[in-house]
Image (cartoon, helix red, strand yellow):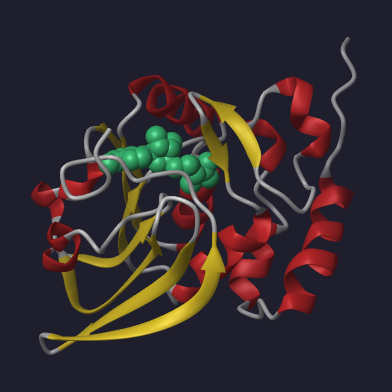
Amino acid sequence: MAHVPDYRLARERMVKTQLAPRGINDPRVLEVMGKVPRDRFIEEALSGEAYNDHPLPIGHKQTISQPYIVALMTEALELTGEEKVLEIGTGSGYQTAILADLSRKVFTVERVRDLMVQARNILADLGYNNVMFKAFDGTFGWQEYEPYDAIMVTAGAPKIPQPLLDQLADGGRLIIPVGDRFSQELIKVTKKKGDIIQKNFGGCRFVDLVGVHGWKD
Ligand code: SAH
């Protein structure tokens, strides 16, 4: 039988050295980051690097985000377990799994159909049954199931797509990298009685959000 490496220790080390010391302190986020098998979301040849402190390629010129960025964006959404969450940019499905563990239901949209299908298979394999997938331009959001208590965009946008602001529930939180094509700032938006409150979580670098309300192809 092939040797299946046990990455439990690598995950614990990741939480202890990359997340907690940099200020991630929501215990639910730390617990889930220590549990979800990140190695399963990348190709086997790279799985030894799964818990390293950097992003990794996932094909189609896309990347799985650095663990710290995944944790930072997740923490910003302040999930309690009851939320309906919209995710734009499924990619590998790793972030999707983290969100699914921390909320009631996740609606995730990916423009590259192959990536969506691959992510759907891995999440089914891991036993997730609270995720809905769609292959489409996520800059339109997913109108059918709005409003969302939390929205996460994991690709860099020139500005916040209006449909996403429209589909955010009152009291809802949205996190999105906004900037030019080379660097962005992580912006958290909170909607309160129609008002939009913005907070900057610092610099980051993501692949392009490509779509009608994003970058042109
Ligand atoms: N959260 C992912 C990161 C994926 S990288 C992970 O954990 O692996 C960003 C993803 O956004 C890519 O897969 C890219 O194809 C997707 N994307 C870019 N523009 C998009 C759009 N308009 N709608 C949906 N997905 C988009």
At x 38% / y 76%, what residue is drawn?
Answer: 188
Image height check: is 185 above or below 137? below
Instruction: Name the quadrant of the C terminus.
Output: top left
Can the viewer see residue 176 in this picture?
yes
- Work out which residue is located at the far top of the displayed protein and give it: 1
Instruction: Tell whether 149 sits left or right of 45.
Output: left
- Expressed as whole percent of the image width and height from the top left, the position of residue 160 reads 25, 64
Residue 216 figure quarter: top left
Q: Is residue 94 left or right of residue 176?
A: right
Quadrant position of residue 157: bottom left
Q: Residue at x 88, y 10 (%)?
A: 1
Question: Can residue 80 be spotted in the picture?
Answer: no
Nearer the observer, 216 or 127: 216
Q: Residue 86, image x and y in percent?
A: 29, 55
Please determine whether, in this image, residue 122 is positioned above or below residue 192: above
- Tell which quarter ligand 1 is in: top left
Q: How many marks?
A: 0
Q: Is residue 137 or residue 158 the one in the foreground?
A: 158
Q: Residue at x 80, y 38 (%)?
A: 49
72 left or right of 143?
A: right
Judge left or right: residue 73 versus residue 195: right
State the residue at coordinates (13%, 58%).
163
Where is residue 76 drawn, in percent x and y?
47, 75
